[in-house]
Image (cartoon, rainbow, N blue to C red):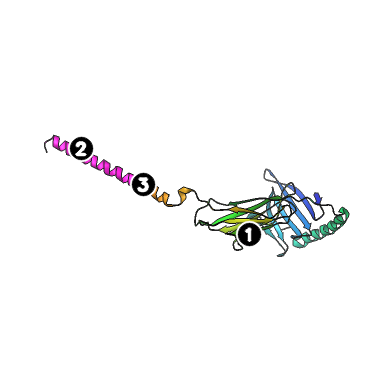
Amino acid sequence: MRTRTYFSVLVLVLIQAAWAVKYLHRETQVYFVQERSPNKHFDVLVDGDEVLYMDFNLKKEVARIPEFQHIVMRGGEAGISANIAIMKNNFNVWKNLSHGTPEPKVAPQIAMYPEEPVEWGQPNTLICLADRFYPPHISMTLLRNSEPVTDGVNITEFYMKQDYSYQRFTYLSFIPNPGDMYSCHVEHEGLQNPTTVFWEPEVPEEQTGPWTVICVLGIILGIISAVVGVILLIKERQRLQAQQHGI
């Protein structure tokens, strides 16, 4: 068990190792409480991948990976909330003892990229990643042509990394069209100013545009010309042979 505390965030990490077949898997249970939103959090990681988290509004576990739909936590939401309550009490005690000790503020590393290679008119998913930031409180807004987008947007829970920093993903289901410009606007207290990262869909030249049609037509015309040339050559040889035989 490892515990880490700062003035505004208390994190509790429970690590277990379990044998499955011949491989050792590492299960990590992550709790944190803080004064800002979200004020409480719980999830389970296996080998660093989040497999489920506790939705405190629905009061149930939500599987991030379908194969783990059957997993439930011992004690359920009530048991997790009881542990959270103890942490909040300890958090208030340690906060008073810290005498306002400042916490580190680490700015996120931000990137935008598509899930699949881009093709015009084909559904895809655009991902905005905020990585290696602390504390776990961040605002991420997706925009299309400078207008905020809400439809088709999904944002994940906070994923804790081994160095106690966090990452968070925002997903947008979209259909790439020429001329569209997407951006991800991020606000975090580790940044001196809000940061916006831009992404514009690009499709390789050979996948689109009139040049593709021209190249195909050129190949077809070349094949036709070759065939016609062979036919004419055969007929000319036949004509010459006929003249030689006096026909």
Task: Find residue 154 and name its label.
Answer: 1
Give the Cα distance between marks 3 and 1: 46 Å
Looking at the image, is mark 2 or mark 3 earlier in the sequence? 3
Q: Which amino acid does the dot numbered 1 rest on?
A: Asn
Left or right of 236 on screen, residue 111: right
Q: What number of labels is visible?
A: 3
Give the Cα distance between marks 2 and 3: 28 Å
Looking at the image, is mark 3 or mark 1 earlier in the sequence? 1
**233 or 197, which lies in front?**
197
> Where is residue 147 drawn, in percent x and y?
60, 62
Looking at the image, is mark 1 or mark 2 earlier in the sequence? 1
Question: Badge 2: few (under 14), some or many (20 or more) residues near its Cα, within 10 Å?
Answer: few
Question: Badge 3: few (under 14), some or many (20 or more) residues near its Cα, within 10 Å?
Answer: few
Residue at the farthest bottom position: 58
Left or right of 152 on screen, residue 39: right
**Quadrant assignment, res 55:** bottom right
Q: Which residue is mark 3?
A: 218
Q: Which amino acid does the dot numbered 3 rest on?
A: Gly
Residue at x-position 46% and y-position 50%: 207
Q: Nearer the viewer, mark 3 or mark 1?
A: 3
Question: Badge 1: few (under 14), some or many (20 or more) residues near its Cα, within 10 Å?
Answer: few
Which secondary structure type mostly characterizes the magenta part of the structure? helix
Residue 245 on the magenta span: yes
Left or right of 220 on screen, residue 164: right
Q: Which residue is mark 2?
A: 237
Q: Which residues are magenta?
A: 218-247
